[in-house]
Image: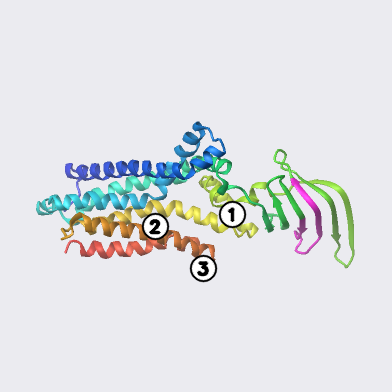
Amino acid sequence: MRFQGLQKLDWYIIRKFLVTFFVSIAFLSLIIVIFDISEKIEDFVRKEAPIREIVFDYYVNFVPYFVNQYSPMFVFLTVIFFTSKMTQDSEVVAMLSSGISYHRLMVPYLVSATIIAMLSLTLSLWILPHANATRVQFEQKYNPWRKVKMGHDMHYKLEDDHFVYIESFSAYNNTAYNFTLEDLSTGRLTSKLTAESAQYDTVTGVWKLRNWFIRDYDEGMGDHIRSGRQLDTVISLTRDDFFRNRYTIQELNKKELDELIATQKMRGDATVNMSLIEKNNRYSLPFSALILTIIGVALCTKKKRGGMGWNLAAGTALGFSYILFMQFSEMFVITDTLPASIAIWLPNYLYTIIAIVLYIKAPK
């Protein structure tokens, strides 16, 4: 049958889909906020967090983050709930009996899922990074579990073939201890700068070295040593580079995240895996809305003896298994078992196969 655009029946399903989705999100978000307040209220009171900051800096930015993170499960449960009800009320049977094919019935579902996926993608790439920056700053200020910790034994490669080693870095005074900078720009070690400490000036971007000495190597066996009490130098390394974690990476927009990944790959920075996980999650999560919608429709368009209860139970189990698998797949990246472009998309690959099988069987 030739597709002639969205009909009244399509808009009926789209309205049911989107209204149920957003109402369920609002309801569950309210419950999550209540539980989160009960868990953090002691920290807020002890740290004397202002009500305005709690509401506008934290929860106004926390709710979109939570909604987007678990939107695949919200989509899935939404499809399970209202499609099961339509099936039990014989609405689906009436639609199919009127000559609408099963494939045509899927159109309004896919349109709705696409709308949600595009909203999620927009949130992930452009809106949430700004919101996350405010939320993370609040958590670091009032939540003890988000405090910045001191780094140890860090190695970095800079873009001009200079290598930095730092034994430890303190966030308290922005100081690196036992600082070493090696110059291999000519293909061999030409100089080695060591300092007892190097303090980073956040205003000028200058590293202030104390008790330093430089050993210059010539092409033969000779070397020359220079030393002093204080030396200012500029390198392509900042304080923020020492404290990239799962939460600070969430603050970066698409362009900033791509630039960070390129820099981390050049430096051989092990934390690049966290950046790659974040980047791939931003794309895989929206795409999953389409897959889970097809699975939900395929599960619920046939009447079952258990009615809506069986559908909701099966849907909840599949939804949570997807979220669990999504979290577990990150371990493949962290342990360097699989590249992020494969590991983070594994849940989508697997559930696409499940969706295809269920979709083929459903009309029968």
Expressed as whole percent of the image width and height from the top left, the position of residue 258 reads 54, 51
Image quadrant assignment for residue 203: top right
Q: What's the amino acid at mark 2?
A: Ile
* Label 3 Cα crowd, 10 Å radius (few <14 / some 14-19 / many 20+): few
Left or right, residue 256 beside residue 114: right
Q: What's the amino acid at mark 1?
A: Ala
Residue drawn at x 24%, y 61% is 359
Q: Earlier in the sequence, mark 1 or mark 3?
A: 1
On whether residue 185 falls in the magenta region, the answer is yes
Q: Choose between 56 and 180: the one closer to the eye.
A: 56
Expressed as whole percent of the image width and height from the top left, the position of residue 14 reads 24, 44
Residue drawn at x 70%, y 41% is 202
Vertical order, 350 against 93 (above or below): below
Q: Earlier in the sequence, mark 2 or mark 3?
A: 2
* Label 1 Cα crowd, 10 Å radius (few <14 / some 14-19 / many 20+): few
* Element assignment for label 3: loop
Q: Earlier in the sequence, mark 1 or mark 2?
A: 1
Look at the numbered discs 1 and 2 and tell me whether their residues touch, using CB distance below 8 Å: no
On whether residue 188 falls in the magenta region, the answer is yes
Image quadrant assignment for residue 48: top right
- Of circles 1 and 2, the one toward us is 2
Give the Cα separation between the discs numbered 1 and 3: 21 Å
Q: Give the residue at mark 1.
A: 262
Expressed as whole percent of the image width and height from the top left, the position of residue 69 reads 42, 49
Q: Give the residue at mark 2.
A: 323
In the picture, the disc for residue 337 is 3
Quarter of the image with the C terminus in it: bottom left
The overriding secondary structure of the stretch rendered in magenta is strand
Give the Cα separation between the discs numbered 2 and 3: 20 Å
Stretch of the chain drawn in magenta:
179-199
